[in-house]
Image (cartoon, coloured by chain):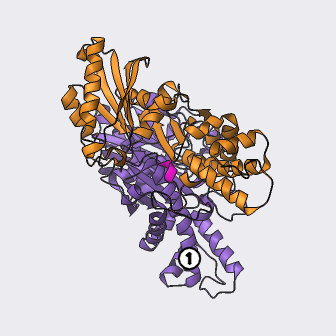
Chain colours: A orange, B purple
Amino acid sequence: MSKYCFGIDIGGTTVKCGLFDTEGNVLDKWEIKTRTEDNGKYIIPDVAAAIEGEIAKKGIDKADITGVGVGVPGPVDENGVVPTAVNLHWGRVELAADMTRILGITTKVGNDANVAALGEMWKGGGEGYKNLVMVTLGTGVGGGIILGEKILSGSHGAGGEIGHMPVEAPVDKPCNCGNTGCLEQVASATGIVYLANKKLEASDAPSVLRGNSVSAKSVFDAVKAGDPLACEVAEEFGKYLGTALASIAAVVDPQVIVIGGGVSKAGDVLLDVVKKHYMERAFSACRAAEFSLAKLGNDAGIFGAARMVLE
Amino acid sequence: MSKYCFGIDIGGTTVKCGLFDTEGNVLDKWEIKTRTEDNGKYIIPDVAAAIEGEIAKKGIDKADITGVGVGVPGPVDENGVVPTAVNLHWGRVELAADMTRILGITTKVGNDANVAALGEMWKGGGEGYKNLVMVTLGTGVGGGIILGEKILSGSHGAGGEIGHMPVEAPVDKPCNCGNTGCLEQVASATGIVYLANKKLEASDAPSVLRGNSVSAKSVFDAVKAGDPLACEVAEEFGKYLGTALASIAAVVDPQVIVIGGGVSKAGDVLLDVVKKHYMERAFSACRAAEFSLAKLGNDAGIFGAARMVLE
C-alpha cells in the first residue's frame, strides 16, 4: 500500500518541496533554488535530484510512493504539458511526462493557483468541503476553483483566472493582461493602493493615510482604527470583490469561498466587507456559501500538489 | 449490452418523452400532459406509465435499457432529490429513487436548463466539445455549464444560474429572484424589451420600433433593417451578455459558448454583437472559445436527459 506522496511548488525564485503521508501529514519540508538560467533547463533535473535525495535519505521504497504532484506558475494542459511559463523562462515543457520518466514515479502537474486551492480544500480554510472557490489577494488576484475535489483547469489553462474577470470600475490604465478593467486592478494589494490614492486625490478629507506611503496593510489598519476615508476604500474594494464572487457563485455554486494571500492578513474586517457585498448580490441559494480565510499560507502549494496525486 | 435509454423533460404544461439508442438517435418521441393538480402527485406515475407503455409497445427487454434520465424545472441535489419545483406544484420529491423503484430502471435527474446544455453538447450546437457554457435567452435567462461532459450542478442546485449574475445596469425594479440588477433583467426577451422601451422614452429619435408593440424579435428585425435606435439596444444587450460571458469564461474557461432560446432565433446578428463585446473583455486565453447557436430547440431537454444516463 502507498504511504507517501511528494508535493512540489515551483516558483520563480524557489522550489518548495514537501514529503507527505497519504493522510496529509507533512513528514518533511524544504526548499531549493529555482535555477532559471539557460531557459530553465536545470529546474527539472534539480527537482528530480531533490526528490531522489529525500527518498534515499528517508530510505523510502519507491513502490510506497503514490506519486509526485507539481504546481507551476503558468497554464497546464490536461496531459501535464506547460505551454509556457514566463517566470521559469520556460517554453513548452512536457513536465508530467518528463518527471514521470526521470523518477519512475507518476507525476501530475497543475497551475500553482489551482493547486493552492486544492491544498486549502485538503488541509486549510476549505477543509471538509468538496466545492470551493479560492481567491488569493496578493500583488495580483489569483484564483482556483475546486469542484468535486478536483481542480477546474479549463479548456485553455484559464480555469479560475478570476483576477481577470471584467469589472465596471473607473480604471484608467491597462492590466498586465492587456485588458482594462480587470478585478485584479481593484481587488489586489496594488488595486487597493490605487483605489486609496484616487480617493485621497479626489478630496481634502482628513485621513491617517494622508502624507504616508499607502499599502493594502495601511488601508486595513486604518479601517480598524475607524478612519472614514479608509473605510470608503474598503467598501469600494468589497463591492468589486463581493460582486465578482456573487457572479462566480451563480456559475459554480461553491460550498465555501476561501480568501488568502497577503491582503487577507487583514482578517475579519476584510472578510466582513466582502461578505456584505456578496450577500447583497448573490443568488438566493448561493448565499448559503461559507466564507473563510486561507490557513496554509505559502504551504498551500505543496499540500495541493501532494493532494493531486491522491485522486 | 444496453441499446436504449429514455430522455424525459418535465415542464409545467407538458412532459416531453424520447426513446433513444445509446448513439443518440431518436427512436421515438412523444408528449404527455403534466398533471400538476393535487401537488403534482400524478406526474411520477404518469411518466412511469408512459415509459412502461413504450417498452411494451416496442417489445423492449428492460435489460437492454441503460437508464432513464429526467430533467425538471427546479434545483436537484446530487442524489436526484428535488427540494421544490414550483411549476410542478411539488414540495420535496425523491425523484430518482422513486422512479428507479417504480420502473426497476436506474433513473438520473437533473435541472432542466443544465440537462438542455448536456443535450446541446451531445447532438447540438456544442457537439464534439466537452466543456461548454449554454445560455438560453427566453422569457428569462437560463444557463447550463458542462465540464468534462458532466453537468455542473453546484452545491445548492444553483450551478449555471447565470441569469442571476449581477450586472451593472440601470435597472429600477427587482428581478423575480428578489435581487435588483440580474443579467436576466437586461438580456432576456423581457430584458431586451425593457432596454428598448427605456431608449424610446429617453429621446425622440426616429425608429421603426416607435408606436408599435416592442418584442425581442421586432428589435432584432429592426437591427437587420439598419434601424439606429434598435442597433443601440442590441449593443447594450450585447455589452451586458458579452461581459457576463467573459466573466464566466474567466471562471470555467469553456471550449464553446452555445446560445439558445427564442431570442437566439435572431441568428448571426445576435451572435455577432455578443461575441464582439465578449472579445473586448475576455481574458486572452479564453478568446479561443467558439460561439455557436443551439440546434435542438425544445428537444435539447430529452437529448440531455438521455445523455445523463450514459456517463
Q: Residues within 10 Å of mark 1 (few under 14, many from 20)?
A: many
The single residue placed furthest to the front in the displayed view is: A211
The single residue placed furthest to the top in the displayed view is: A59
**Badge 1 sits on which subunit?**
B
Give the prevailing secondary structure in the magenta stretch: loop
- SS for tag 1? helix
The answer to whether residue A114 is left or right of residue B81 is left
The answer to which of A279 and B101 lies nearer the viewer is A279
Residue B155 magenta: no
Boundaries of the magenta span: A157-174
* Residue bearing mark 1: B219
Horizontal and vertical percent position of residue B208 = 59, 85
Res. B14 visible in picture: yes
Residue A172 magenta: yes
Q: At 69% across and 83% down in the image, what residue appears? A: B203
Q: Amino acid at mark 1?
A: Val
- Give the quadrant of residue B293: bottom left
Q: At 68% across and 53% down in the image, what residue appears? A: A196
